[in-house]
Amino acid sequence: MTNQSYQKFRLTSIVLALIASTASISSLQASAEVPMTKAVAPGYYRVMLGDFEVTALSDGTVALPVDKLLTNTKPEKTLKSLQKYHLSTPVETSVNGYLINTGSKLVLIDTGAATLFGPTLGRLANSLKAAGYTPEQVDEVYITHMHGDHVGGLMNGTQMAFPNAIVRADQHDADFWLSQANMDKAPADSKGAFQGAMASLNPYVKAGKFKPFDGDTELVPGVKALAARGHTPGHTIYAVESKGQKLMLWGDLMHVAAVQFENPSVTIAFDSDNKAAMAQRMKAYADAAKQGYMVGATHLSFPGLGYLRTEGKGYAWMPVNYVPVK
């Protein structure tokens, strides 16, 4: 073979190798083009509080048109506050529950919506199971208030979701939401809230498993109910304490972090008494910032656990740092 022939042969070999390589890469790329699953995994996040194990449980998210729902402010101010956090309306808003294992009692605070708020919620039961527990193991269920996204998960269809649990809530909320007379005189667009509360609580009432309390009450060692009325007539927050560490679970003391931390005077249309709800929020914010304890809330972005500090005329939210529980 002449030198010229050899050069032609070598060039042809290189070209063929490049073609084969390109075909191989194209084949790999084609095989990688699989459909996106877009599935949502059950959500739980665990922290230790002294000797207590606290597990945040996700019920999912719901889109809220907060520019229309927030009151004592203007829609344009709400939108401006949202933009600072790269948010727009409607805002995907978390619904969280909290499971407290004290070592002797397994206590669930709020149960999510189940079927009462549409298909994007109702995941708390799956989150509970993913976290390593079963509904049958829950000893007590404490309700912050009787709105559907807090009590719906008490039922699994026509069956009590927590068959071995005692359910507790403030008597003022029970008197209001479980009253047929109150439902009868409520506006048509509010009757569903009464129906949801009744469907969720009445089976426990009939079974003798509902035990209301009135105001500040220690329920089990280390877990205390504290009256925070305003959002509803019997809205309650829960203080959890172990070995000098404290967690305050706020329920619906606030709804939109991007707006209401900066300006605690902003209220929401869901409040039964927005002036009282505002006063409770301001009190809770100030105490949390001063004392430095952990807080959790139903509608803070999951897991909804963190700390508050003062910033300007308002407050800033500091989510908990991710730390695997050992």
Image (cartoon, helix red, strand yellow):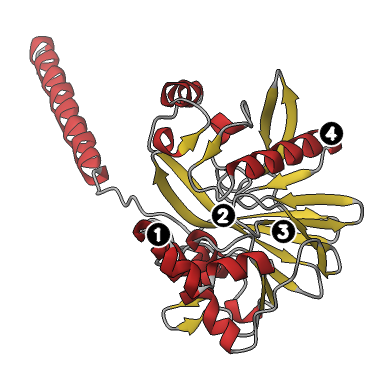
Q: Residue 252: x, y in percent?
A: 60, 50
Q: Residue 317: x, y in percent?
A: 66, 32
Residue 237 lies left or right of residue 241; in this view the side is: left
- Looking at the rendered structure, the kind of residue marked 4 is Lys
Residue shown at 36% from the left, 57% from the top = 189
Q: Residue 115: x, y in percent?
A: 40, 67
Who comes first in sequence, dot 2 or dot 3?
Answer: 3
Q: As displayed, is residue 219 above or below residue 232?
A: below
Who comes first in sequence, dot 4 or dot 2?
Answer: 2
Residue shown at 59% from the left, 76% from the top = 134
**Distance in Å between CA atoms under marks 3 and 4:** 23 Å
At mark 2, the secondary structure is: strand
- Looking at the rendered structure, the kind of residue marked 1 is Phe
At mark 4, the secondary structure is: helix
**Pointer 2 residue:** 96
**Pointer 1 residue:** 117
The nearer-to-camera label among 3 and 4 is: 4
Who comes first in sequence, dot 2 or dot 1?
Answer: 2
- Looking at the rendered structure, the kind of residue marked 2 is Asn
> Extreme top residue here?
4
**Pointer 4 residue:** 290
At mark 3, the secondary structure is: strand
**Pointer 3 residue:** 54
Q: Nearer the viewer, residue 53 or 316?
A: 316
Residue shown at 18% from the left, 26% from the top = 18
